[in-house]
Amino acid sequence: MKIAIPQINYHIGDISKNRDLIIAAIKKAKAMKAELVLFPEHAICGAYPQDLFEKEYFVNECRISIEKIAEQCHNIAALVGGPNLDLEDGILMNAMFFMYDGEVRGGVNKTILSDYDVFDESRYFIPGESNTPLRYKNQNIRVIFDEYESNMIEKTDTIIVHVGSTPFTTESFAYRKESLSYIARKQKCPLISLNHVGANASLIFDGNSFVVNSKGISTYKLAAFKEDFMVIDTERLLNAPALKEKGPDTIALIHDALILGIKDFFHKNGFSKAVLGLSGGIDSALVAALATEALGKENVLGILMPSRFSTDHSVTDAVDLARNLGISHETLPIKEIYDNFIATLHPVFKDAPFNVAEENLQARIRGSLVMAISNKFGHILLNTSNKSEAAVGYGTLYGDLCGSLSVLGDVYKTDVYKLSRYMNRNGELIPENTITKAPSAELRPGQKDQDSLPDYDTLDAILKLYLEENSSKQEIIAKGFAPEIVEKTITLVNRNDYKRAQCPPILKVSKKAFGSGRRMPLVAKL
Amino acid sequence: MKIAIPQINYHIGDISKNRDLIIAAIKKAKAMKAELVLFPEHAICGAYPQDLFEKEYFVNECRISIEKIAEQCHNIAALVGGPNLDLEDGILMNAMFFMYDGEVRGGVNKTILSDYDVFDESRYFIPGESNTPLRYKNQNIRVIFDEYESNMIEKTDTIIVHVGSTPFTTESFAYRKESLSYIARKQKCPLISLNHVGANASLIFDGNSFVVNSKGISTYKLAAFKEDFMVIDTERLLNAPALKEKGPDTIALIHDALILGIKDFFHKNGFSKAVLGLSGGIDSALVAALATEALGKENVLGILMPSRFSTDHSVTDAVDLARNLGISHETLPIKEIYDNFIATLHPVFKDAPFNVAEENLQARIRGSLVMAISNKFGHILLNTSNKSEAAVGYGTLYGDLCGSLSVLGDVYKTDVYKLSRYMNRNGELIPENTITKAPSAELRPGQKDQDSLPDYDTLDAILKLYLEENSSKQEIIAKGFAPEIVEKTITLVNRNDYKRAQCPPILKVSKKAFGSGRRMPLVAKL
């Protein structure tokens, strides 16, 4: 059977646009003589509409568009994902609609719902009771939403279609390919794995739809991180050559994901211009370089805001960066505003010694300056905090934690360094001195990150165990880390959920990002 | 049977403290000759530990404490809620442990999980397969977690115990009483409904545990919004007099809930002092009055931060408020800092006309000042935005939206007025002029809220339909609201999820509060 696989960047909630994209893909598939065309889970509504699923009119609009799409299906069949409301009992299911001869003729409902990490399917859906194959042109097409449904596959199935839309992590494609190839091999049945491509605030979809034959060998793969379209012939899969694929390394993957994440956040929200503070440090330099690649140098504005504690190299490094990237920059010193704040606060502060209040004040003055520029000209503020800082609360709420999107909030500091080197692979963008100097917030004289934090190699290793593996303090210490450093790190992580609760959405690239994937009580004794 | 009902303020994650509270209550129950003592769902861990349930060491610690409690149960039985890990298959269940003769002797697992509003039970738990009554002293004790499990009740059951912990809303107690009384009457079986009391950041538990007899008549009720302890005799319920209860009105309920919410947020986090900006307006005045009642006048500090746009009455009203409440206040004018910001921004702003950038700047200067005081002295900043403003985005991110706790974020502006009148019921606390003057953000000359928003009666009515009833635009217009006002309101609500995503936790008092109860995608086209 000739099967078309369109890999499309859907937009959450833009049902009519998604419908038109799907109809155009069906026409293209027909023109290419395909007999069946496959769209993934949630194609009609984008992934994921969250509480829009609770609105009856939203679900109804999805259904009306599904029917309109079905009307286009003559001499071709299509499988399209969307919410399925059972009008008799008011039950909503996560469904794939199967359509041909101008009508919806059947479908499949997801039977095992996902309720982990960022997923809340039981909030919206009731699980389907059974999963039966779709019968079409002498084929038994088995639709599975994810690998947990693979035990429903039967020997009589002739094609397996995996429709689950999977948010990107550095390991998601490798995992998807391995687990689904195993299923194809075990079932001796060709398998097609569909995926969305595109980003929606925190979630990024990497595309990488693929086809494996009944021996479990990958024979076709659609593009990573961009739209694509392919027609395959299931009769010819066994003879097709195996893909010779050396996957990109982790840092390149993170790079590609963040670029798409920035692009789609701006484009889908109708924004074009970004602003960010340039401290001369590596985090803001990396975000500026990524934003420039994603949005174009004419759309990125860097603001230098030196204080009395800023070293000379902070300014020269930031200027070098702006010149390397070809972006505009402005310098707005904060000394006078700071002095004015301190004078205004004197009746309250009196002679209290310099402490975190004055440090945070500098960060908040900078936040207010870049937000003023954002409000005046419509630039969107990019947040530049990294995951290591976010984890231990090394950042100022309403200061450097401001922004509409956190680009690096799921990237550990050690990976920030690697990613910066990667950005420079074709020539220096991020100044060498920015990469090699000791990291500092420069909020008091001679301050260095490592005055108050463990070295980043140690910190990141502990954080990965605690955040991503749910290891206990004792288990981490047992791996050889110094007890007092483990204790301090975990205490800092647990004390700072209140800060992270007010941070911008974070582009997710790991299996456990801060945001809706981590849900912690804010008054817990830990 | 003599049954003790301790109503306790548990602390999330403080397992050893909760264990000690439970053991003390068991001893007290024994001393009062009770044969059975009842603790609600999640008693050992507090409600709700969220992702702490994903940590194996946390679940293990809960279990160890459950066993310690069981050791205390001689000549008395106890029912205690906590997570139940099936060690064989690694399945976690939401359980009630039943213990006597020094050991856990049985229990019940929740069979129908809750996955709506703030609840994510399927994220952590597998539903129990069956619900069988606990047999003790010739009684069949049927434990139900909520009314959805009532169809499991059998004729042979002699006592029904409802253990679900229910977060407060203005309607929660009335609903709980009505639905559970109906079940008791229908089953001709006495019913005891348990509840937590106390607050945990956004969720407030109102206590109000109660007992109904087999005719469905309420005979006993424990205290609202505070700890309590009662021993009842199930043999005597039929002859006990019906409670003559006139429930407090909605505004009094909201008041009591907010007071407990503030108190517990501070006490459970180990804070004592609050700071907030006093604008002379009604929202900050109400929050100051509530905080003073909850924390004591010596623990509340008000900061007046007039600008050139502040009217004289703003300052005098705020000073009157501070005097009425007996709290300290400081006045920090922002004119000079503002002028300095504008001068600093001039190279970028040039001659661009005054707009929202300058308005927001004033709010952010104020935010930075109160946060500086918070950082210097350890006062916790209270946010003063109300639900109507939060809904339509009428507020400045990193400005007046700063704070560790939003006291009024679930209180509509029309209720802010009623609550202010209620605060003045024993004499003026909130100055009359603050209540009667037209509301204004005072960020530009002559500004009034109603220049940019519909009148609050109309706005709040539309918001309730859209947010709490999930009504569509068409349905709201059909109720007689002007189409252009409905359109504008809904557009504003949908455009401002990005702001609310960075707001402080909100004390929940309605059936749909902003926060984890509303989960919206941030790039949706709506």
Image (tube, coloured by chain):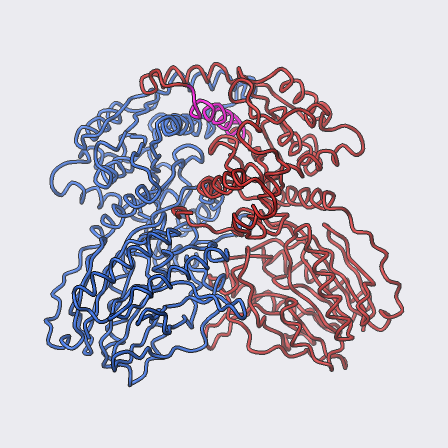
Chain colours: A red, B blue
Q: Tell whether A209 sits left or right of B510.
A: right
A296, B205: nearer the viewer: B205
Residue B236 at x, y percent in the picture: 13, 75
Residue B371 at x, y percent in the picture: 39, 29
Asked if the magenta segment contains residue B287, the reply would be: no
Q: Tell whether A337 sits left or right of A161.
A: left
Residue A86 at x, y percent in the picture: 51, 74
Q: Write the residue at 37% across / 72% down.
A: B107
Q: Main secondary structure of the magenta part?
A: helix
The answer to which image quadrant residue B317 occupies is: top left
Residue A105 at x, y percent in the picture: 64, 77
B455, A429: nearer the viewer: A429
Q: Which residues are magenta?
A: A354-374
Which quadrant, please, contains the N terminus of chain B?
A: bottom left
Q: Is residue B426 visible?
A: yes
Query: Would you place residue A212 above or below residue B518 in this image?
Result: below
Q: Is residue B471 visible?
A: no
